[in-house]
Image: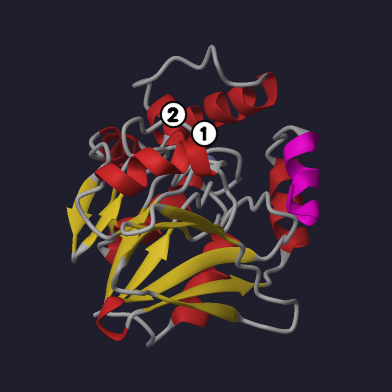
Amino acid sequence: MRILVLSDLHANATALTAVLDAARDRWENVVCLGDVVGYGPDPNEVTTTIRRLGARTIRGNHDKAATDLMETNDFNPVAKVAVDWTRSHLSADNLKWLAELPQGPVETDGIVLVHGAFQDEDEYVFTPGQALEGLLDSTAAVTFFGHTHHQGGFSYENVNSSLEVLNIHPRPSESFAPLRIEPQRRYLLNPGSIGQPRDSDPRAAFAIADLEHHLVEFWRVPYDIAEVQARMRSARLPEALVQRLVMGR
Ligand code: ZN
């Protein structure tokens, strides 16, 4: 089964549309690692699209903040403005759906989904040390995580206890970079962010997992960033959030 893996959509409907167009007819099942909303101008459109797709979805910290399941004291001032804007613009029905999203880890179709770390949904996994716990403890050989907005991940080989950082960056001319899944290794993989990439590539990121064929594809697709920025400015979302989309930072 080919599984479309979406994460950190952040209310960016233009990026999500570009992703779904690029992935059309390439997947049979779809999962979502959270942060459906927050930062972007289209919280209702993106939430409705994810609901319509029937994506198996876990909550992210922005979904929790927008639905008052989490304090925003730890959010920076710009992120907090976006949380409050998002909360006031979401429909009652979409707010309810977001508030009821389950917490990761969730196991489905032979993979495990988490938003942040395996043991803590709000923790960022940037380093091999932070990744190790999840690589060892996850109930599946392949676990997908989000939260950092960095495409790539880590793998671990049991016999020699070797932990490898997977630097996966589809070139500007490429749509995707394939990763071969080796049976003796365990994987913690980040599909990257659709709505607000932070790994210096502004293209929307996602992944397609085909474990029967031992393959994960890490995709990047361009989208009309200026169109999203115009909607953000007319919504009076913070200018720092508007500008970072172009830089992919
Ligand atoms: Zn996020």
Point out the stretch of residues depicted in magenta.
Answer: 239-249
Looking at marks 2 and 1 on the same chain, the residue that comes earlier in the sequence is marked by: 2
Q: Is residue 130 above or below residue 224?
A: above
In the shown orientation, is residue 16 left or right of residue 184?
A: right
SS class, disc 1: helix
Q: Name the residue at 38% across, 57% down.
A: 160
Whether tag 2 and tag 1 are in contact, CB under 8 A, the answer is yes
Q: Name the residue at 39% across, 52% down.
A: 161
Q: Is residue 33 above or below residue 19?
A: above
Residue 13: x %, y % from top left: 54, 59
> Label 1: how many residues lie within 10 Å, few (<14), some (14-19) or many (20+)?
many
* Label 2 near ligand 1 (CB < 8 Å): no
Residue 168: x %, y % from top left: 60, 67
Query: Looking at this view, is 79 or 217 the one in front?
Result: 217
Q: Name the residue at 80% across, 53% down.
A: 247
Residue 201: x %, y % from top left: 72, 61
